[in-house]
Image (spheres, grey):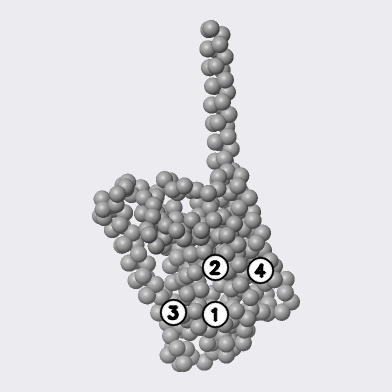
Amino acid sequence: MPISIFGFQALWSPVMIGVLVFLTILYFLITVKWRNDFKVSEPLKKKEAAYFLIGIILLYIVKGSPVDLMAHIMFSFHMVQMALLLLLAPPLLMKGIPWWVWKAVIELPAVRKIFPVLTKPLLSLVVFSGLFSFYHIPLFFDYIKLDEGLHGTYTFILFLSAIFMWWSIVDIEGVSQRLHGLKKIGFIIGSAVLITPACALIIFTGTPLYDTYTNPDVWLKAMELCVPASTLAGLSLSGPELFSNMTPLADQQLGGILMKIVQEIIYAVFLMSIFFKWYKNEQDNAEEITQKALDDLKVQANL
């Protein structure tokens, strides 16, 4: 059955479009028109604007496009959605926000004391992994998916925790970082390890875990998160099997596998980037030490 039966609002989320357009306009007002109102600022760089716009587009794809609708129909789409929302969108948006904006936000009285705590590497890693794993415990997952307010709040908190976690990895010019070089590599490996148990449970269990993807009544109620109740009332739907040939168990297992694949690809890109940057710094430092030693020898020889 085509998903077009759910209508334009469910497919393309005009509300999400409005929110993201507003955030984009606000971004350019702050970084361009209002830039001189900051104590310290620099002209917006093209690469920063590009990072931010790509991040905004990605947010719309995962939370406003038909991908979001499919994520409520099929668990495999949900897991890909979560991987992109939590592991790719945050670093893109973080790189897109100029350092002087970050500096101004971090130094706000309400933020100054709590931000250093929330971004502590070990704490941020444990909190993010814990929130992600807790969310995918079947009992809590089904409960959260049936309440629009709770679902939105938890998703937002999870997204913030992802930003705090990525703070130890993403380099932002002009803002001090807690981890450098090989410590970042260890941090990324630790993140991959901590998320693995939740994915393993989803992949290797022998039965479908989530009523919101298997029980027709519960699934239909959960669909109200993205489809107006009035639209659902006019449709005769028996369950998610109308939109997929996959069994619930196969869909669930595929979701866990896709989550790990997307995670590993994103983390691999960051690992390579961090390693080559660390290696280059080590080579540069070695050359500086060697050159200094040669200069010292020359001085001594002249004496």
* Mark drawn on residue 198: 4
Work out how far the residue at label 4 is from the one at label 2, CA to CA, in angstroms. 13 Å
Work out how far the residue at label 3 is from the one at label 1, CA to CA, in angstroms. 20 Å
Work out how far the residue at label 2 is from the one at label 3, CA to CA, in angstroms. 19 Å
In this rendering, the label closer to the viewer, 3 or 1: 1
Looking at the image, tell me whether mark 3 or mark 4 is earlier in sequence order.
3
Question: Does residue 213 appear to the left or right of 65 in the view shown?
Answer: right
SS at badge 4? helix
Work out how far the residue at label 3 is from the one at label 4, CA to CA, in angstroms. 29 Å
- Residue 32 placed where, x, y %? 28, 53
Against 176, is 230 above or below? below
Residue at position x 55%, y 16% in the image: 296
- Residue 48 placed where, x, y %? 39, 51
Of the pair 54 and 165, the residue shown nearer to us: 165
Of the pair 95 and 242, the residue shown nearer to us: 95
Dot 1, how many residues are within 10 Å of its Cα: few (below 14), some (14-19), or many (20+)?
many
Q: Decide: marks 3, 4 in contact (CB < 8 A)?
A: no
Instruction: Say which residue label 2 marks.
Output: 82
| Residue 243 image-quadrant placement | bottom right
Q: Decide: marks 4, 1 in contact (CB < 8 A)?
A: no
In this rendering, the label closer to the viewer, 3 or 4: 4
* Mark drawn on residue 144: 1
Residue at position x 57%, y 51% in the image: 269
Of the pair 1 and 119, the residue shown nearer to us: 119
Q: Amino acid at mark 4?
A: Ala
SS at badge 3? helix
Looking at the image, tell me whether mark 3 or mark 1 is earlier in sequence order.
3
Against 60, is 45 above or below? above
Q: Amino acid at mark 2?
A: Met
